[in-house]
Image (cartoon, rainbow, N blue to C red):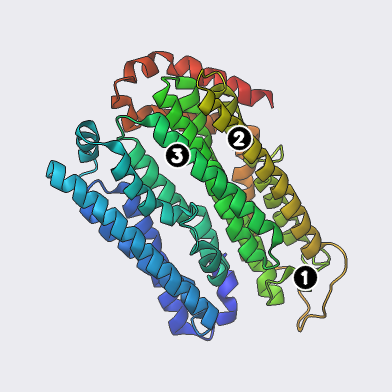
Amino acid sequence: YGAGYLKAYKNAAYKLSLHWILFILFHLSMIWVTLLQNGFVFLIAWEIMSLSSMLLVIFDGHLPKTLQAGVNYFVQMHISIVFLTIGFLWVYLETGSFDFDAFQTFFTSNNNLWLFIIFFVGFGLKAGFIPLHSWLPHAHPAAPSHISGVMSGVIVKLGIYGLIRVISYVQSDFNLLGELIISISILTGLYGILNAAVHRDFKKMLAYCTIENIGIIGIGIGLGMIGLGSHSPMLYYLGFGGALLHVLNHSLFKSLLFFAAGSVYQQTHTRDMERLGGLIKSMPQTAIIFLIGAVAIAGIPPFNGFVSEFVIYSGLIEGLKSDNINLISLLILSFAGLSLMGGLSILTFTKSFGTLFLGNERETLPHQPHEVSRIMLLPQYLIIAVMLSIAFVPQWYLIIVGNLLSGMAVVSHPIAEEFEVSSLAAYSKTLSHISLY
C-alpha cells in the first residue's frame, strides 16, 4: 500500500530511500519490544521505535502543522520513556535486576499501586488513555496514511502490550486496579467518540476513534483484573479475552479505514469531508472498503468488531453476579458507556460515509478522482479477508486467546490452582456464547 501511496514522490529518491529505511527500522524495533526480557534493552528498543516513528510522521516536514505534530509526538514519547525508566530503576534498586521477572519479586514484597501507576503513565501515553492522549489526534493525521495505519493498528497497541505485561506480575490489589482502569477507560472511550463525531477532518476523526477503542480495550482489561481479584475464571477470560481480541480487531479495521482514507486523500488532496461527496461514483471499491471498515468499527454484526465487543459485554454481565454494590454500579455504568460509544460510533460513520461517498460533490476538485491502483487495493482486501474469518469462525481466535491467557505469568498467582481447574469449563462456556450470535 505504501509504495502506491508514495508514488507521487517518485522524483524525491533520497527522501523515499530514507523513508523506507526508517520504515524497516520502525518494524524491527516493534518486534524487539515484544521479544526482549531485559528492561534496559527494552528501553533502548522503545527509544528506537519512538525516534523512527517520529521521523516517519514528519515525512512532509516542510508543512508547519506536520512538523509541529512530529515534535509534539517526540516530546510526549520521551515523557513516556522517563516514566518507564523510573519504573525499571525502582524495580532494579529493590531487586538488583532489570529483568521483567523481577517485577514479581517486587510486587510480592512492595505496594503494587504506585509502581503500577508509574508504568500506567509510561505505557498509557503510548496507548492514548486520557489525559495522556494529546499526541494522537495530531500525529495520526500528519503521517502518511500507511504510517497512520501502522501507528493506530500496532504502535498504540504496544502501550496495551506493556500494560498487560506489567499486570501479569501484579500480586494484589486486583479489584482496586481493575476499577481504576475501567473508570479511566470509560472516560477515554466517551471522550474519543464524542470528538470523532464532530470532526470534519476524516483522518483526525479516525484518530479520535482510536482513542475510543483504547477505552473499549481498557474496559476489558479492567474486567479481567476484577476477575483475578474475585477469583472468577469466567470473568478473567471474558475480560482479558475480549480485550486481546479487540486489540487484534481494531488493528485490522482501523488500518483498513486509514488506508481507505489515504486513498481518498491521494485522489482529492483534502481531508475536509465537507468539501467532498459522491466519491462512490469515481472510487467504488474504496467506498465499499470504507463501508466494511465502518460497519466493523461500529460493532455491527456480522463483522469482527461485534465479536470482541460481545465478549466484553458478556464479561460485564458476568460481573453483575458480584455482591459488591460499588462494583455492580461501576459495571452498569460501563455497560451504559459502552452502549453509548456504540451508538455514537454508528452515528459518526454513517455521517462520514454519507458525506464522503454519497450524494453529489460539494466542490469542484482540481483533479478528477479515480480509483486507486491495485497495489493499494490488494492489502485492503487481504485485511478484509482476515476480518471476515474472525467474524464467521471466532472460535479459532478465541481458542488462541484462551491459550495465551492460560500461559500468562498470572498463573503463578496464589489462585492459579483454581484457575487451572475451572478454566477449561469457563472458556468452553464462552465459546458457546459466541457461537450463538
* Earlier residue among tags 3 and 2: 3
The residue shown at (63%, 65%) is 203
Give the SS element for disc 1: helix
Give the SS element for disc 2: helix
Residue 299 in the image: x percent, y percent? 67, 41
Residue that label 3 marks: 180
Q: Residue furthest left?
A: 96
Work out whether 109 lies above or below 377. above
Nearer to us of marks 1 and 3 is: 3
Left or right for 394, reference 422:
right
Name the kind of residue labelled 1 in the image. Answer: Glu
Disc 3 residue crowd, few under 14, some 14–19, many 20+, Cα 10 Å: few
Number of marks in the rendered image: 3
Q: Nearer the viewer, residue 308 or 21?
A: 308
Name the kind of residue labelled 2 in the image. Answer: Leu
Q: Nearer the viewer, residue 52 or 352?
A: 352
Residue 245 in the image: x percent, y percent? 53, 38
Q: Residue furthest right?
A: 360
The residue shown at (49%, 14%) is 425
The residue shown at (58%, 56%) is 255
Name the kind of residue labelled 3 in the image. Answer: Leu
The residue shown at (62%, 22%) is 433
Work out whether 343 lies above or below 63. above
* Earlier residue among tags 1 and 2: 1
Residue 274, labelled with which disc?
1
| CA–CA distance in space, label 3 to label 2 | 13 Å
Residue that label 2 marks: 333
Which quadrant is the N terminus positioned in?
Answer: bottom right
Q: Quadrant of residue 311?
A: top right
